[in-house]
Every structure is written in structure tokens, then in C-alpha cells.
Amino acid sequence: MNRPVFYLLLAGLVFIPGKEAAGQNTTVKSDWPTYHGGYSLNGVADTTLPDSPARLWRFKAGYRVDATPILAGGRIFFTAAGGRLYALDTRGRKKWRVNITEDAFTAPPMHTAGMVLVGSRKGRLLAFEAATGKRRWEYHVGGSILGTANRVALAGGKQGIIVISQINGAIHCVDSTTGKNVWKTGAVDRCDGSASVLHGRIVMGSCASALHVFLVAKAKKTADIPLGPECQVAGGVALSGGLAFVGTRSGNVCAVDVAAGKIVWTARDSESEAFTTPAVDEKHVVFGADDGNVFCLDRTRGRKLWQFSTGESPSSPVIAANRVVVSSGGVLFLLDRANGRKVWSARVCDRITSPAVASGMVLVGADDGTVTAFGRKKRT
């Protein structure tokens, strides 16, 4: 299975020991440390948005932006074509830029513990200081990296960074301080998507039409959960509670009990590929499919509550209070979470990334080399 980079890339919180270190991250409050929110990739933002967001600013990088920006510690980070990584403040002013001319960033950035981590086409995981852009270390996985890096809690209060080799789906865990290997799993199959982390477990999908579950403490795989025929996974897995939610090549979306290793329900509302990462809150599962539709399902049974046609292939959606934020082609949409009706839309460019939503702001990158912020304008 070979998907365009844009779809694969559809495929930060400051590190605080304790609750977050244990993997209890379910809702992002003020930051957006991965392309799909917290480290569980559930796509839920603890913020509200105005019904008619205004354009707050637009930063011109001049180089195509294919991966969703992230926001952490008052900084916005994004990658651009040509191996460029930028840091902006929340008013859209550049703080620093780095460039690796000999390579290209193919994975969306991730923030943790004062670092920004990005995977490259040549299989390098690079760590940069969030404050300065100084390169801290690099680690080679041997094969390109498409999915986001993520973080795990290691023994002795240490933090690890996990990254997947696209070619065979092997997970590498490195020490966040030194960049040295801690452990590595065996191969599973090609992996074009992203792994999520919650409650000491890592869950990822692959071209084997299955989810794979790993225990961080034991550094080994504990389950392969088949999803059905033609159910290859090329997007991210959203974890919420004890369940994993994932879209597949067949268009099926599955809810999986991770501990029991079994499928709870399968929704077959779309016959087109559903490679976006679902957004999951207490009652809803929202995903986009290549047929141009955004679907909202009942979390408990997988029953369809509504669908909305965007006209093009939608990206990974975000749930923000009573709204769903989603981009499709070059248009950004705000939908009513209860019924799927359009509340607002704006054309940004020919093609934009999936949205990042934090602190009352929506961020999208674009193929014209810009990053745009929408939100509520402050009164002067």
C-alpha cells in the first residue's frame, strides 16, 4: 500500500512527572504536542472556539507545509519542505529556524520535555531544543519515518521517545536525554501511521490489517488484533479509556478493547479509505473518509449519528467542546458536534493540513508555504 504523503501526514505539553508520566493524557488543556493533540492521539481539545473565527495572523515560510503544526509552551512548531523546522510565538512571529539540507522531514513534529522531535526520510529521529532550535541528538532507525514520535515513561522516572520504522513497523525506544537506544521490538509489517500511548501501552496499526499492542514496562508485543480483510491501517490510532479507535483501508472504523484484545464494534458507513485519525470524546467518534464525508458515530455502539459532505477528502478531525474542526482540500470547517451542521467555513489555500486546536486558536499549514491562525480577536 502506497499512499500520498499528504494523507500519511494526516497521519506540546511540557513534560510533568506524575500523572502525565503515567500516560493519563486524554484531553489537551493549553497545548497541542502532536499532530492530533495529546500523546493518546484522541484529537480532543479542552477549549472553545467562536462560531465565526477571525484570521489572527498568517506566517509566510515560503516552503510547502504538509504536516500539522503543533503548539507547546507558548511556541508553535512546524516543518516545511526542504528539511526546514520553524518555531513561532503565538502571535506568528518567527523565533528560530533550522534546516537540514541533506534530508527532509517526513513525520509531523512532536513536543515533550523541552524538545521538538521530528522524523526524516532517511530514517533519522532528530531532537531539537524547543527554546533555541539547537540540535540535541539524532537516532537512526534504518528506513524512513512517517508516523509521529511519541513519549513513554521508563523505569526510574526516566522518559523515553518511541519512533516507528516505516519499512517494517519495528518500534525503537530511545532515552530522551541521550538519544541512545533503550529497546527495540521485532518487525510487524509496513507502518505508514502513528502509534498512540496511554496507561503504559503502545498501540499501532499496520499493513497487516491489524492493531499491535505493546507493554512499555516489558518492552514487548502482547497482542496482534486482526481487523478484517482489506483493513490495513495507514493513519494514527486514537486511545481513549481502555479502547483504541482506528480507520482502515476498507472504510471500516473499529473500536477495540486493548486489554482483552478483541473488537468491540465495527462501523461500515464508508466504503472509501478512512486513513484519518479519529477524534474521540466521552460519547462521540468522529472521522473522515476519502469519499469526502465526515462521520460521527456513537462511541458505545458505533451507530452513525450524522455525516457531513466536505466535497474533498477530509483530514483528521478535532473535537473542541460542542464543535468539530476539520479541513478538507483547502477549506477549514467548523461543524456542530450534535448534528453535523456547518457552523462556519473559510477557504485558506488549495490544500491545508489537519487542524491543531489549542488555547482558543486553530492552526493550519498550507501548500502555499504558510501557517494561518484563526480564533477570537481581542478587543483593543
Image: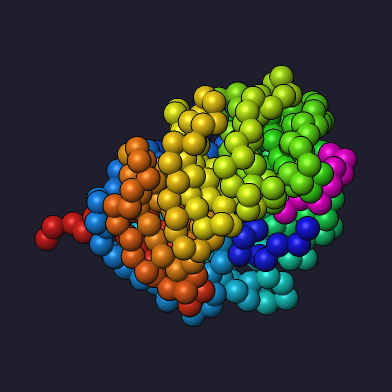
Q: Is the residue 350 above or below the residue 259 in the image? A: below
Q: Is residue 258 left or right of residue 32?
A: right
Q: Is the residue 324 above or below the residue 370 in the image? A: above
Residue at the image point whose x is 65% and y is 58% from the top:
8
Q: Which residues are magenta?
A: 184-193
To which quarter of the image does residue 144 belong?
bottom right
- The N terminus lies in which quarter of the figure? bottom right
Q: Is the residue 191 above or below the residue 44 in the image? A: below
- The C terminus lies in which quarter of the figure? bottom left
Residue at the image point whose x is 56% and y is 57% from the top:
291
Looking at the picture, tell me which residue is in the foreground, 223 or 83. Answer: 223
Residue 157 visible, this orientation: no
Residue at the image point whose x is 57% and y is 52% from the top:
289
Report the coloring of the rendering: rainbow
Q: Is residue 232 left or right of residue 59?
A: right
Residue 82 visible, this orientation: yes
Q: Give the overall secondary structure of the magenta segment.
A: loop
Looking at the picture, tell me which residue is in the foreground, 306 or 28. Answer: 306
> What percent of the width, then of the height, locates residue 91?
32, 63
Residue at the image point whose x is 51% and y is 31% from the top:
303
Residue 188 among magenta residues: yes
Q: Is residue 276 left or right of residue 281?
A: right
> What percent of the width, then of the height, locates residue 361?
34, 53
